Amino acid sequence: LHVTSPGERHDATPRTAGVQLTSVKQPEWGLRNGAMMIVVRSPQTLEEADRRVLAAWAADCAEHVLGLFEREAPHDTGPREAIARARAFARGELGVADAIRRRFGARVADRRVSAAALAAARAAGQAAAVAHVGAHALGAAAYAANAVGLTVPGQPDVIATEIRWQFDRLSEEARAALKRLPPVGETRSGPLGPGLLSSGALREIICVIQAALAAPAHVLPARWPFVSGQR
């Protein structure tokens, strides 16, 4: 996302309410340095209606593995609260700006836990972030599947089972929304660009999900290429 402040010049593009828009893509409100500003969406953002649909699915993915975190940090309610925010956004009870504000004001999950528990907590954080950028739904699914894989390193079949569970809970609307996202690593702006989701086991999981979505019958592969047990 590119945001410019009032007074910043860029003669090649129009100005709106003192804020420079550097793309023809649809702008919307977002947070930067604690202030609400107009931002330009990347292809990973998706329409608000799509994000609300995906938030429900991402919350399902994260909640399915939440016990991995809560067993090790039973008094840390941050991930559960993040999932609740995702569901509230999905139901239309939380607006985009409010969801973003609450996300950035939320507590960081306890990091003194196992890699599997931390991945489960990150899945919850990704689910809450869908209100801001739709591609975080794939992050929630990938972290959730990897959390399961981290409990039994070297056994990718458990990741396969988790992804199948996730696919079984995809509505037609959610499938269509996910198919509108660019492939992981294709665009630089957004969670599917350079970073954690575009490397290691997380990237492999997302590649499998996106390949299955692109297949005519949404068929998951018979052989699973990813390496279980990566952080």
Image (cartoon, rainbow, N blue to C red):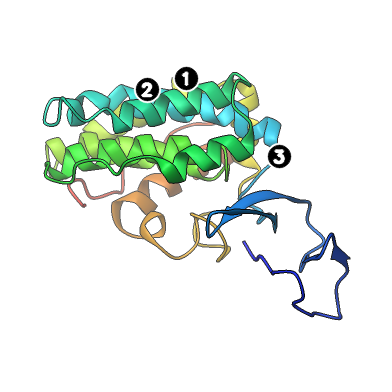
Q: Is residue 204 above or below residue 195?
A: above
Task: Please say whether residue 215 is visible from this viewpoint.
Answer: no
Q: In front here: 210 or 92?
A: 92
What's under tag 2, amino acid-wise?
Answer: Trp
In the rendering, at what x and y percent does residue 200 appear?
A: 30, 57
Left or right of 146 in this view: 154: left
User: Image quadrant for the N terminus?
Assistant: bottom right
Q: Which mark is residue 165?
A: 2
Cα distance in 3D space between marks 1 and 2:
7 Å
Q: Is residue 55 above or below residue 137?
A: above
**Mark closest to the chain's N terminus, 2 or 3:** 3
Q: Are marks 2 and 3 in contact (CB under 8 Å)?
A: no
Residue 217 location, x and y as percent?
57, 29
Secondary structure category for the residue under label 3 = loop
Question: Real-space Cα distance between discs 2 and 3?
Answer: 26 Å
Q: Quick one: SS at disc 2?
A: helix
Q: On residue 169, which mark appears?
A: 1
What kind of element bears circle 1?
loop
Question: Which residue is tagged 3?
Answer: 47
Q: State how many labels appear.
A: 3
Q: Nearer the viewer, residue 99 or 147?
A: 99
Q: Amino acid at mark 3?
A: Glu
Residue shown at 23%/50% (left/top)?
A: 227
Q: Is residue 194 above or below residue 158?
A: below
Q: Residue at x 50, y 61 (%)?
A: 193
What is the crowding at mark 2: few (fewer than 14 residues within 10 Å), some, or many (at least 20)? some
Where residue 78 sits: x, y (%)?
Answer: 30, 32
- Dividing the picture into quadrants, the one containing residue 16 is bottom right
Q: Which of pointers 1 and 3 lies earlier in the amino acid sequence?
A: 3
Left or right: 104 in relation to 189: left
Tell me whether circle 1 and circle 2 mark residues in contact (CB < 8 Å): yes
Residue at the image point whose x is 51% and y is 24% from the top: 56
